[in-house]
Image (cartoon, rainbow, N blue to C red):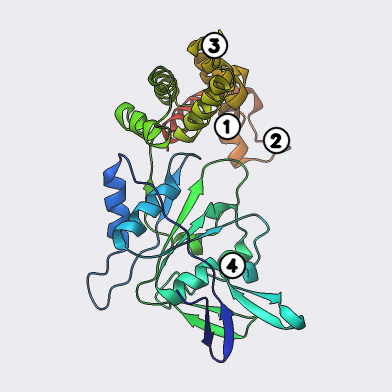
Amino acid sequence: MERETRIDGVRLVLARQHDVVGRWIGQHEVLRQLLACWLVVNEADLPLTPRLIGSPGIGKTALVMAASQMRKQPLFIYQCTADTRPEDLLVTPVLGEQGRLEYHASPLVTAMITGGVCLLDEGNRMNEKSWASLAPLLDQRRYIESIVAGITVQAHPDFRCAVTMNQDESTFEIPDYILSRLQPSLHLGFPSRDDEKQILEYHLPFAAAELVGMTVDFLQSSHELRLDFSPRDGINILRYAMKRMAQDPDHPLSHDAVWRESVQACLGDEALDLEAQQEKRARRLGMQAVSMGLEDLLFDLDDPLRDIEGDDDDSSYGDDADDDDDDDSTY
């Protein structure tokens, strides 16, 4: 791929594409759903830009890699952060050789120009100002305007995009006018036991079978209790355990002792007691749910109509909210 191009007389240095390695294991339906979003079924049709939702470490990035491989398109990844600026997302001025100003296209703009796939990773960590710069790209207009470089870039017909989103507290609320452009929502769940075993064996073919089995049992138990330990956590547990065993092959530590040490080192002491973790999480969610009753929504704290004594009667709302939160936490 050429590393530079010109648009309206402005020279742009293009970003490097991401080297795609690996394969997608399990959850074939969500892969088919993503590929369907990127189909164009008529001359008047446009591809969709879906948002992929799930817990960290569950394979959202790997899913987009697999889809780009199947479409035989280059992949570009932009890591969204809280301090991402529109110029970071589009075209950035850089001081080059001999003090000359150069314009560097982001991975997103490079994908637009070359007809590649762009993954906006962890999109809900990005602020509204940056999202606003993408509004014309995400609808039927399919272009961006770089104020810095003074150019408009039209997306190649083959350009495709997806956005991953993690569900945690360190994210921004994405405005509705952007969410309406990021459709549909595709949810990734935790893998089945067989798929999880294949994932661990694929990434760590040298790992002892006993340790792999213990890790799969641990992860599957955590999924059943709706805790957020992911295949990525399992890979890290196995990596550390194997390194500890390789460090001193003659050490009398059993596989079980090494594995427990690895879980503690990677996930903390509490991870060894999953049921206690689940109870602690349920208590936390319950406290959050019952902290706001119906009167909190209808009246201010100093409003005389606020029925403070009726708080206990509204506790059922907390129970319902707790159930809803538990149902959603598997994604």
Residue 246 screen position, x and y as percent: 54, 23
Side of 215 where 45 appears, left or right: left
Q: Residue at x 58, y 25 (%)?
A: 267
Q: Quadrant of residue 286?
A: top right
Q: Residues within 10 Å of mark 1 (few under 14, many from 20)?
A: some
Q: Which mark is residue 257?
A: 3
Element type at mark 2: loop
Earlier in the chain: of badge 4 and badge 3, it is: 4
Can you tell which of label 4 and label 1 is closer to the viewer? 4
Residue closer to the observer: 106 or 127: 106
Q: Residues within 10 Å of mark 4 (few under 14, many from 20)?
A: many
> Would you say the residues marked 3 and 1 are in contact, meaning their CB atoms lie under 8 Å apart?
no
Q: Quadrant of the C terminus?
A: top left
Q: Secondary structure at mark 3?
A: helix
Q: Dot 1 lies on which element? A: loop
Disc 2 marks a residue whose amino acid type is Pro
Question: What is the C-alpha distance between the residues marked 2 and 4?
Answer: 50 Å
Which residue is at the front of the view, 246 or 10?
A: 246
Q: Position of residue 257 (x, y in %)?
A: 54, 11
Q: Please name the residue that numbered disc 2 is placed on.
A: 304
Instruction: Identify the mark nearer the N-term, 4 or 1.
Output: 4
Of the two numbered discs 3 and 1 on the same chain, state the one appearing first in sequence. 3
Rounded to the nearest angstrom, the CA distance separating label 2 from label 3 is 61 Å
Q: Which tag is nearer the camera, tag 3 or tag 1?
A: 3
Q: Earlier in the sequence, mark 2 or mark 3?
A: 3
Kind of residue sitting beneath label 3:
Ala
Q: Which amino acid is tagged 4?
A: Leu
Horizontal side of residue 311 vs 135, given as left or right: right
Label 2, label 1: how far apart the Cα atoms are: 16 Å
Q: Quadrant of residue 253?
A: top right
Callout 1 amino acid: Gly
- The residue beneath circle 4 is 89
